Structures are given as structure tokens and as C-alpha cells.
Amino acid sequence: MKGIFTALIGAFDEQGQINEKGLREIVRYNIDHSKVDGLYVNGSTGENFLLSTPQKKKVFEIVKDEAGQEVKLIAQVGSLNLEESIELAKFTTELGYDALSAVTPFYYKFDFEEIKDYYNAILEEVDNQMIVYSIPALTGVNMNLEQFRELFENEKITGVKFTAPDFFLLERLRHAFPEKLIYSGFDEMLLPASVLGIDGAIGSTFNLNGVKAREIFESAQKGDLEKARKLQKETNDMISDVLSNGLYQTIKEVLKVRGVDAGVCRKPMKSATESQIKFAAEIQKKYFE
Ligand code: HMN
């Protein structure tokens, strides 16, 4: 379960329906071209929170069908509707997903006991492992070391996707829980996180840049910091341009330039404008050709 995991981008048509052919192409591209170790399915990048339960299930099915046993698969099943989370956890476990992940419950100001109960309730129902998805900037949920310790008391919670710029907490977690899996969630911070001893990374930009992400991770692990810094700098130039042009729209448009039909974003997200499409083509040329 270690290594580079792509947070899989979604593929939808103009009506917001799943573009099955495009989704399969995205999966193949990540496996065959980028050679990532795994896929993180129905995360933020997959526009998960915009989908109905049947649509989420369809994505899980298509990805598993296309990827088979070729790479590890993590199913993000977190939802404010706990019954939906449990249903998706059971569904993906039966499909053969290697791990579950669930975003910390958000929007309402849940206290820590409620958050802990949420994870334990999901895990009581399934025989699978869970990677906690911590992304304080989007959820407002900021857990401290002691709270992670309490979550990790459940042996089925085997790790965390740590999407925060808090390197003090990351180091404390690494030190305190050497046996748990820690994945870095911010691609632009892959190098410092790698130096602190993470087990892997899960990122949206790996849909485009999986090959170089692995090089950063592996160079840092080998102690070749000069090379890792150069690669992270090049990567961050690219990420800055991608973010300035609209993250998901740009990932999709760059993939299309490469012949991968990543479709458009689902409403209420906007589809790429002409100028975003044009800049995406420039990004492809500037960083990838
Ligand atoms: C997911 O749930 O789809 C991803 O794992 C989220 C991932 O951590 C990304 N975070 C967000 O999109 C908020 C990052 O890859 C991020 O897109 C990247 O570092 C650029 O900022």
C-alpha cells in the first residue's frame, strides 16, 4: 500500500453523466503511462461530493473493472450520510478494493467523539482497512496528535491521508506511529513530506505528473536532495500554472491534449472556458513536451 497514488480525476459528459469510456482511459493512462502504484477513487478530485450514491457506485465498479489487480485501489466512501458511507464501504469491500478512506465529517461542527464514532461505525460493518482523509482547509476539522492516537486505537484504521501544510504535526505523527501508513496530500509539498518519512502520496496532479512525482519521492528517500529539489521546483512551476487556470478543468483539458477523454466538470462546477482550454494546451507544451 506504499507509493504514488493518483487521486483519480472524474470524467463526465455535458449532461453530468459518467463518461465510462473516458473514465476507463484515465485509469489506463495512470497505470500504463504514469505507472502509479495505486488509485484513490471518488476523492475530491473525482468530484465525489457532487455525485449520487448510484453514480459513486458506478465509478467504483468501472475503475475496479478496468484496473483489476494491476494497482492498489483505495475507495473514498466518506459522506455526511453515515448510512451511505457504510453502504459504499460494504460495496467497495465486496468489489475487492484494497482499502477504504473516509473524509472527516464536515459542514456541521462535529466534535471529536462524533468523528471517532463515525469511523468506528463504518468499520464495524466491514472487513477492510481505513485511511483517514484529513483535509482541514476544506473540512474545518483540525485533529491533533492525541486525537489521531485515539483514532488509531482502532486497528482497522491503518493510516492517514495528510492534506495539510503542518509539518510539525506530520513529523509528530511519523514519530509516534511508525507502523501506520502516512500519505502526503499536497503535491506541491511532496519533497518536504518525503523527507519526513511518509509512506506515499495521494495527489490530483499525479493524473498529469505521476512519473515525476515518483522521482521526487524516490530521490528524497535515497537522500538525493539536490535532484529532488530541482524536480519539486519544476513541478511547482507547473502546479502554480495549473492552479491559476482552475485545477480540475486544467487537469481534464491537459489530459484531452494527450488523447485521454477526461470529459468536463459536473455542475455546479464550471466547464473549461476557451481561454482555460488554450492555457491548458500551453501548460502541456511548456512542462510536458
Ligand atoms: C482527493 O481527495 O481527490 C485528493 O486526494 C485531494 C488532493 O490532496 C489534492 N487536494 C485538493 O484538491 C484539495 C491535492 O492533490 C491538490 O490538488 C494539489 O496538491 C494542488 O494543490
Image: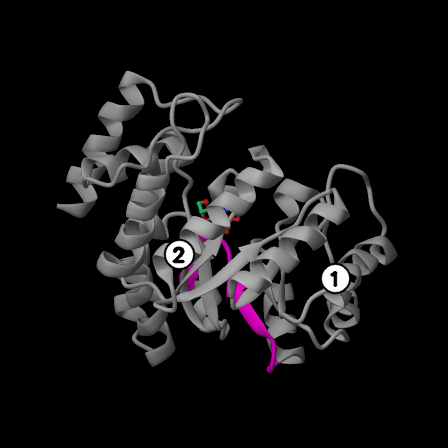
Q: Amino acid at mark 1?
A: Asn
Task: Verify whether residue 145 appears in magenta.
Answer: no
x, y percent for residue 139: 68, 43
x, y percent for residue 202: 46, 58
The label nearer to you, 1 versus 2, is 2
Residue 220 placement: quadrant: bottom left
Q: Decide: is 151 above or below 258.
A: below
Residue 42's label in the rendered image is none
- Which residue is under mark 2? 65
Depth check: give the residue in front, 127 or 164. Answer: 127
Asked whether, in this view, residue 143 is left or right of residue 226, the answer is: right
Residue at figure coordinates x 50%, y 72% from the top left:
196
Regarding residue 176, the answer to whether it shows in the image is yes
Location of the C terminus (image quadrant): top left
Mark 1 crowd level (few <14, some 14–19, many ≥20, 10 Å Cα): few
Asked whether, in this view, residue 155 is left or right of residue 234, the answer is: right
Establish whether ligand 1 lies closer than 8 Å to the Cβ of label 2.
no
Q: Amino acid at mark 2?
A: Asp
Q: Decide: is 22 above or below 160.
A: above
Question: Do the numbered discs 1 and 2 sit on residues whose CB atoms are within 8 Å?
Answer: no
x, y percent for residue 209: 29, 52
Q: Decide: is 188 above or below 14.
A: below
Residue 149 placement: quadrant: bottom right
Alpha-carbon distance for marks 1 and 2? 38 Å
Residue interval drawn in magenta: 178-191
x, y percent for residue 46: 48, 42
Secondary structure at numbered mark 1 = loop
Secondary structure at numbered mark 2 = helix
- Which residue is under mark 1? 144
Residue at figure coordinates x 33%, y 80% from the top left:
222
Mark 2 crowd level (few <14, some 14–19, many ≥20, 10 Å Cα): few
